[in-house]
Image (cartoon, helix red, strand yellow):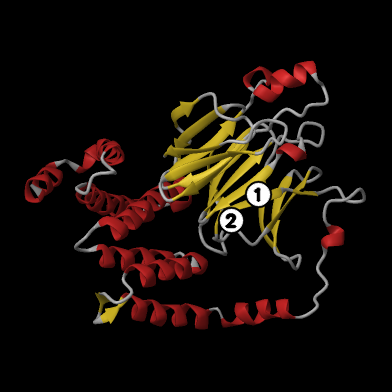
Amino acid sequence: MQERIQGFVDTIPSENRDQLIQLEQCCRDLPEVTLLQARLVELENAEIAELSKADNPSTNERELTRLKTRRNLYLQQLARHDVKSGGLWAVAYLEELQQEHEQTLALQWLDDISARWKESPLIDNLTGAQFAEVKREEIISARTSTATYLDIDEYEVQKYDNLRSGPTTFRRELEHMIDRPGPFAKLHYFWNPRSQELTAETDYQEQKWVFPIPGKTLATVDVDRTSIFSSGPYMLLKFDNSLSLWVSRGPEVVPLMLWTKSIQESSAQTTSGGINSRLPWYEVSEPYAGPVIEDRVYYRVGGNLHAVDLLTGRALWELKNISDSAALFGAGAALGLISRDRQLPRELTAVNS
């Protein structure tokens, strides 16, 4: 059966890549999907190489980022589910992370390799644990200067909390929720209405990135409804009534926004909105963005749960009548919702993502 499926997959023309992508999404729970994923890695790599050779690759940077992100998702899936060659796919994904200088993500992936192939042969007569240890030492030695700088955490260093959001400053620090460690996780995010910029900074006031977001003013942005949700190489920015997804491209390059969409809601959509119409002091629930699971992004608007495509923001499905105070979190391939309104019955719900 495997040979027959492999023969079928090999005969699908490369120009039918979109159909292959849809087929992979439909069949992801089946063991045979690894054959589709391997073919898609081959096709994505060929497209990446072609776009990289273009006269002006910067004009294709968003498409290049989408291709690399999707290719990396397939590599992770193959590493976890390809019984015969999972180890080789794991090494291939590690090499891609190192090529993009994503050292934080590479170290996390080495932890996965060590746990999954602990005593099993992986490559070059090394077990997973041995390979992970060798690679970990290489990465850490390359980060010696950074590690030396970070060691000052052990001392009484004056941080700049007094410069953060307060009545004497124009910028405001945004709420930052972290689902998985990654390049976005250890940063603080500030909105400056004067410069119309979102800045990301370290604990020691080192500016890491600047995200220009035109068209927003202090009068139109409700900072209390603006937050960051980071999940591995992805960052969700909930900016008042809009949601955008940003993807990391290495520590020295500003992250790229793949899409943005409106998440405007009406008070009639929410249970708390109905209560608020009778009791004005009762706070109406605000939208919640996150988490990111595989190639899907989840968010809640009122009492509706939405799933959209990671790379395009295209709507996939909507689940109505959930708690409109629910926070969302991911665990493996499952999606959890827990209500946070202390004035209503608390609920915990699990959804197959």
Amino acid beneath label 1:
Phe
Residue 192 makes an appearance in the image: yes
State the mark number for residue 254: 2
Furthest toward the right, the residue is: 168
Q: Residue 211, labelled with which disc?
A: 1
Left or right, 113 with reference to 323: left
Residue 8 or 55: which is nearer the viewer? 8
Position above or below: 60 against 261: below
Residue drawn at x 80%, y 20% is 279
Q: Is the residue 321 above or below the residue 325 in the image?
A: above
Residue drawn 75% across the image and 68% down it: 204
Whether residue 260 is visible, yes or no, is: no
Query: 278 or 242: which is nearer to us?
Result: 278
Mark 2 vs mark 1, CA separation in Å: 8 Å
The image shows residue 156 at horizontal and vertical percentages of 80, 78
- Pick the residue in front: 211 or 89: 89
Q: Amino acid at mark 2?
A: Val
Q: Assess whether mark 1 and mark 2 are in contact (beta carbons under 8 angstroms).
A: yes
Judged from the image, the secondary structure of the residue bearing numbered disc 2 is loop
Question: Of callouts 2 and 1, which one flags the residue occurring earlier in the amino acid sequence?
Answer: 1
Which image quarter: residue 290? top right
Q: Quadrant of residue 264?
A: top right
Q: Image height check: is 327 above or below 184?
A: above
In the rendering, at what x and y percent does residue 215 appear? 71, 34
Category of crowding for the residue at label 1, using alpha-carbon neighbours closer than 10 angstroms: few (below 14), some (14–19), many (at least 20): some
Residue 104 appears left or right of 151: left
List x then y, in percent, for residue 266: 66, 20
Quadrant of the image containing the C terminus? top left
Q: Tag 1, which secondary structure?
A: strand
Q: Residue at x 73, y 20 (%)?
A: 275
Q: Residues within 10 Å of mark 2 (few under 14, many from 20)?
A: some
